[in-house]
Image (cartoon, grey):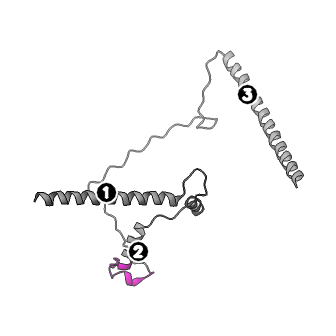
């Protein structure tokens, strides 16, 4: 089994190194061609001939004059807008004008979905983080506990602060 793995690895390494060597040779030949063309360009003292690559070889085409832009209309142009018919899914949710009726269960679902957390894009990663399976990261339950303890401590601090302020006002009264 181990010998087969070694054969596969060496066979794969040979193919990769062979391909890398072939690409290296192609790069070297291209660099030689670049040097050759650069030296030819440096030796020629004549002004370089430039041509447009937008038009094919052959006779040159004259440019047609562009038409003048249309003048804006003096009065606004109104278009007829066709209202969409109510969806056929549930006709009880729409009135005769096609406007949606007040939908209390739908409102409740929208409000509830607004306060829900978005769906996890990678639930497996969430499980690893919650269980502490990724090294170097604290478990999510530990972070939740720390945050909960902070909230409790802050609430207790604010309670005693408010209690102290009330007691001070009561004594001075």
Q: Residue furthest bottom?
A: 92
Residue on which the image places disc 3:
31
Q: Nearer the viewer, residue 59 or 154?
A: 154
Residue pictured at 36% horizontal, 80% vertical: 94
| Closest to the observer, 85 or 158 | 158
Which of the two labelled residues, at mark 3 and mark 2, occupies the earlier sequence position? 3
**Residue positioned 51% across, 61% down in the render:** 141
Q: Categorize mark 1 by other alpha carbons within 10 Å: few (<14), some (14-19), many (20+).
A: few
- Per the picture, the main secondary structure of the magenta-coloured stretch is loop
Above or below: residue 132 compared with residue 28: below
Name the residue located 38 percent from the left edge and 44 percent from the top edge: 68
Mark 3 secondary-structure assignment: helix
Q: Residue at x 58, y 33 (%)?
A: 52
> What secondary structure is marked by label 2?
helix
Q: Which mark is residue 157?
A: 1
For mark 1, give the secondary structure.
helix
- Mark 1 / mark 2, whichever is N-terminal: 2
User: Can you say whether 83 is above or below 126 in the image?
Assistant: below
Residue 113 sits inside the magenta stretch: no
Q: Quadrant of residue 59?
A: top right
- The extreme left residue here reads 173
Q: Is residue 54 above or below residue 97?
A: above
Residue 104 on the magenta span: yes
What segment is highlighted magenta in the picture? 88-105
For disc 2, the neighbor class at 10 Å (few under 14, some 14 to 19, many from 20) is few
Q: CA distance from mark 1 to mark 2?
A: 37 Å
């Amino acid at each position: 089994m181990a010998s087969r793995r070694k054969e596969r690895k060496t066979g794969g390494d040979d193919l990769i190194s062979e391909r890398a060597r072939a690409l290296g040779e192609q790069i070297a030949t291209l660099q030689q061609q670049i040097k050759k063309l650069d030296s030819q360009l440096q030796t020629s003292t004549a002004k370089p001939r430039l041509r447009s690559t937008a038009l094919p070889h052959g006779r040159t085409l004259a440019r047609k004059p562009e038409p003048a832009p249309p003048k804006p209309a003096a009065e606004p142009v109104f278009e007829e807008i066709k209202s969409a018919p109510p969806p056929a899914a549930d006709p009880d949710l729409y009135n005769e004008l096609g406007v949606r009726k007040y939908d209390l269960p739908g409102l409740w679902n929208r409000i509830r979905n607004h306060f829900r957390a978005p769906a996890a894009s990678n639930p497996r990663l969430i499980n690893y983080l919650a269980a502490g399976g990724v090294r170097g990261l604290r478990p999510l339950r530990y972070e939740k506990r720390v945050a909960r303890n902070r909230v409790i401590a802050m609430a207790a601090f604010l309670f005693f602060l408010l209690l102290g302020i009330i007691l001070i006002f009561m004594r001075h009264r």
